[in-house]
Amino acid sequence: MKYKLGDEVYLKGVITSINFCAEIKCLYEVKTADEFVTAAERHLEPINKEEAPLCLRNVLARLRGLPEHDREVWLKNIMDEFELDFSHAKWREGYEQGKFDGAVEAEKSNKVVIPQFVADIIEEYKDKGAPIIDIFTEKYSNEEYNTWLVNELNAYDRAARAWLDGYDVKQENRYVVTDGNHLYFKECQENVEIVILADEMSGTMNYVKKFDSKDEAQKVADVLGWKVQEVQNESKI
């Protein structure tokens, strides 16, 4: 037998009459394949394609009930399966409505705030004359960018708005190597151990090597016997 005592089941049928008397607990009469039964509202579930959100809630509830590791595996596979469709939909929605959820730092200028590496991607694709949607395909070959899109709040919206409306680059701490007295490390070249710049001329600091990691800067500083200095990197488009 397919069912045993105690199994919870749904009984498919059609509502044939409704009793509007508040004193009666079972307001509905439902015709099944063989007979009529009475039922309370809490016992009924609609069979209707338009009720898809109810099914979605059930799926979400089951996902929340999974162990953390299993839930992460499910979510990753769902994102891998539908992320391109999602990015297209979010771009269309934002483009048509003309509004996106920007970062808090950009509220005064009405521009979103994005990291420098995201700004570099946007400018690279604009220089190629590529369509906006191409900036989202970059994630397949750029792990840092893919991580940002997945983990940052409203990342797809922010990238799209940055393309359309301009952006502010997030102020980030960078590191330079200096002797502490107007000399700065620029780069290493073939046949030349190092290139040093003096900050005596305006604009010199634009060409000084800026490290994203303090540890990377410290390695160079140790070779030169110099020190690491923290600076701020900010640019706007």
Image (tube, helix red, strand yellow):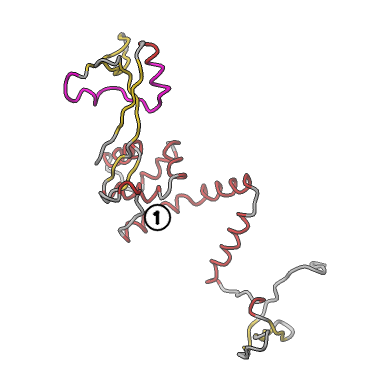
- Above or below, comparing residue 111 to residue 13 in the picture: above
Amino acid type at image mark 1: Lys
Position of residue 158 measured from the top left corner of the image (x, y, whole percent): 35, 48
Quarter residue 141 falls in: top left
Location of the C terminus by quadrant is: top left
Q: Position of residue 28 (x, y in %)?
A: 65, 85
Q: Residue lying farthest left?
A: 201
Q: Position of residue 113 (x, y in %)?
A: 33, 44
Name the residue beneath numbered marker 1: 90
Q: Position of residue 159 (x, y in %)?
A: 35, 46
Q: Is residue 93 magenta?
A: no
Name the quadrant of the N terminus.
bottom right
Question: On the rendered structure, is 145 left or right of 34?
Answer: left
Q: Nearer the viewer, residue 149 or 78?
A: 149
Viewer-closest of 117 and 68 = 68
Secondary element under disc 1, as helix, strand or loop, is helix
Residue beneath the point at 31% across and 41% down: 122
Q: Which residues, given as a range, are shown in magenta?
A: 200-220
Could you say which is closer to the camera, residue 209 or residue 143? 209
Residue 209, magenta (yes or no): yes
